[in-house]
Amino acid sequence: MTEIQREAMEYDVVIVGAGPAGLSAAIRLKQLDADLDVVVLEKGSEVGAHILSGAVLDPVGLDALIPDWKEKGAPLNTPVKEDNFYLLGEEGKVRVPNWPMPPLMNNHGNYIVSMGNVCRWMAEQAEELGVEIFPGMSCSELVYGENGEVKGVVAGVFGLEADGSYGPNTEPGMELHGKYVFLSEGVRGSLSKEVIAKYDLAQDSEPQKFGLGMKEIWEIDPEKHREGTVTHTMGWPLGKNAGGGSFIYHLENNQVYVGFVVHLNYENPHLYPYMEFQRFKHHPMVAELLEGGKRVAYGARAISEGGYQSMPKMVAPGVALLGCSVGMVNVPRIKGNHNAMLSGKAAAEAAHAALAEGRASDELTAYETEVRAGAIGEDLKKVRNVKPLWSKYGLTTSLVAGGLDMWTNTLGFSFFGTVKHGKSDAEATGKAKDHKKIDYPKPDGKLSFDRLTNVSFAATNHEESQPSHLKLKDEKTPVAVDWTEYAGPSQRYCPAGVYEFVTPDEGGEPKFVINFQNCVHCKTCDIKDPAQNIVWTVPQGGDGPNYPNM
Ligand SMILES: Cc1cc2nc3c(=O)[nH]c(=O)nc-3n(C[C@H](O)[C@H](O)[C@H](O)COP(=O)(O)OP(=O)(O)OC[C@H]3O[C@@H](n4cnc5c(N)ncnc54)[C@H](O)[C@@H]3O)c2cc1C
């Protein structure tokens, strides 16, 4: 095959991903030196199109980055006024009062926001400072320099042939070279995964852990809407089957974010996270709120849950991992946007200092030191045992033990030290024969919806003529292993109905079908597939969901 010729463009810093981490880095770099050449590349059709976050935003990151964000019109319009936490049974609920919660769990001073809109606003701020932002540009490959350092990325490959080869209509994209490359791809970034493996960055950390977050936006009866109210629940319907819980945030315009997170270390391969979410909405407390309303959007995304002990080394020659490419979510607070912003700022400051000294393409160790020893490390360290205690002891015991541990950590010590996570989420999956099937009620079409109907509310799109971006390492494994031993869990864990095992009419072995067009880029398949045979790669730019004000 002839070698592909690509134009190359040179920058000081190349940033992959226009989420809160990447945009914060871009803004900070240009605040520090207006002459720096900074580019941000985003696979979504526009900035915000792939952003799916609750969200209750702790403004600490924005305060540090753009202290006058209010005057500059940042879309933080809904301060949290009321904070509720319930333990649910099938019919009833018990309110856990706020007073025994450690202060870090308090949501007062935070805002209910559309993170998509916050990112759109941050992109405007960045562009005003002179950052080049290219949406609709997927970064599909890393470019390495002569000494093995990361030198840049390949972006903007369009129109591949169906078999993945280059044809007459293929645009080969371009190389964007940077003295430093920042990977701010969010959870389970495909280039970040490559960098972590190539430089063995996770050798001293615990395995990363994840949850699957699914979310709908509802417009509800104005009589029931209570702007600024935040509600979290745990318990029903997951019970002992899996860790997780829900969030219900009342934002502006009679809208409510209704979301559900299922921890991906569940063992029972019959569990169907999407249907757990749908079932949850039939709890009397939730049904009463949503009845008479309408669901206007749906989406899903994995969320990093490993926290402090799962953060890999985050720098290698020429490259730094930012935000949730590292995994910076404070799990009990379900918040990672503030740390994503702080990490972007810290990476920018380290790169700026290095560039000022004439350095390039080396390790930005000052960035890693700041993350671990500064505000991000402090935030994550206090809550580091909550998730592993939950995984080990279940909901009730871990609520008490995790709560106690957060309190003692707030005072500066822990009875538990640092609890290990143990297995990866893929390894945690048990065999089908060892677990009971779960019966899920059929969606009623009013409060609960079948998966494909809901996926149409994610407005996701992938060119059908393109090769599937969901690759199999081995074609036979889905039937030989996933189907035979695990009852085909991809049919259930994918919140977009991408994977199917279709049995022929005449019987016999099923066929594994990948409906990649439905993919919402949540990355759950890459994380949970027990054989680790499914690899999520980046499709061409502009493909994927088109979230409104998620
Ligand atoms: C359901 C759910 C609810 C949440 N609720 C909250 C909350 O209430 N509060 C809170 O603070 N946090 C919340 N979080 C966590 C929060 O979303 C993350 O911590 C945050 O998004 C991390 O920011 P990031 O910039 O690292 O990554 P992201 O926000 O994921 O942004 C990454 C960007 O990079 C782009 N990208 C990825 N790969 C490529 C590539 N190869 N080429 C080009 N572009 C690429 C993506 O399209 C995306 O736009 C929630 C998460 C979920 C899933």
Image: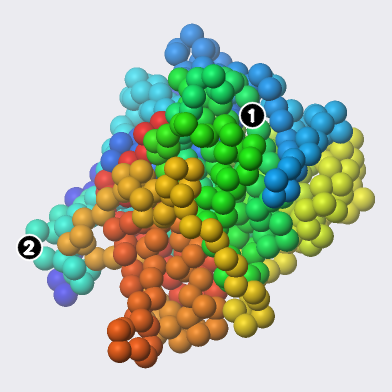
Foreground residue, 182 or 310?
Answer: 310
Q: Quadrant of residue 391?
A: bottom right
Picture coordinates of residue 312, whole percent (x, y): 62, 56
Q: Amino acid at mark 1?
A: Val
Question: Would you place residue 200 above or below residue 276 in this image?
Answer: below
Q: Identify which residue is drawn at 78% across, 53% down.
A: 395
Q: Residue furthest left?
A: 168
Whether label 2 lies within 8 Å of ligand 1 gets the answer: no
Closer to the observer: label 1 or label 2? 1
**In the figure, 389 relative to 109: above or below?**
below
Expressed as whole percent of the image width and height from the top left, the position of residue 101 reads 82, 34
Query: Which residue is at a point 31% across and 44% down the rendered structure image?
Result: 459
Residue that mark 2 sits on: 168
Q: Residues within 10 Å of mark 1 (few under 14, many from 20)?
A: many
In the drawing, does residue 21 fall left or right of residue 454? right
Question: Which quadrant is the N terminus positioned in?
Answer: bottom left
Is 304 on the left-hand or right-hand side of 447?
right
- Residue 126, position in %: x, y? 39, 26
Circles 1, 2 touching at the beta carbon (< 8 Å): no
What is the secondary structure assignment of the residue under circle 2? loop
Of 234 and 28, the residue lying toward us: 234
State which quarter of the image contains the C terminus. top left
Question: Is disc 1 placed on a helix, strand or loop?
Answer: strand
Q: Residue at x 52, y 50 (%)?
A: 278
- Give, as a three-letter code, the residue at label 2: Pro
Q: Which residue is mark 1?
A: 230
Relative to 368, does residue 31 appear above or below in the rendering?
A: above
Q: Residue at x 64, y 64 (%)?
A: 266
Q: Earlier in the sequence, mark 1 or mark 2?
A: 2
**Is residue 385 in sight in this rendering?**
no
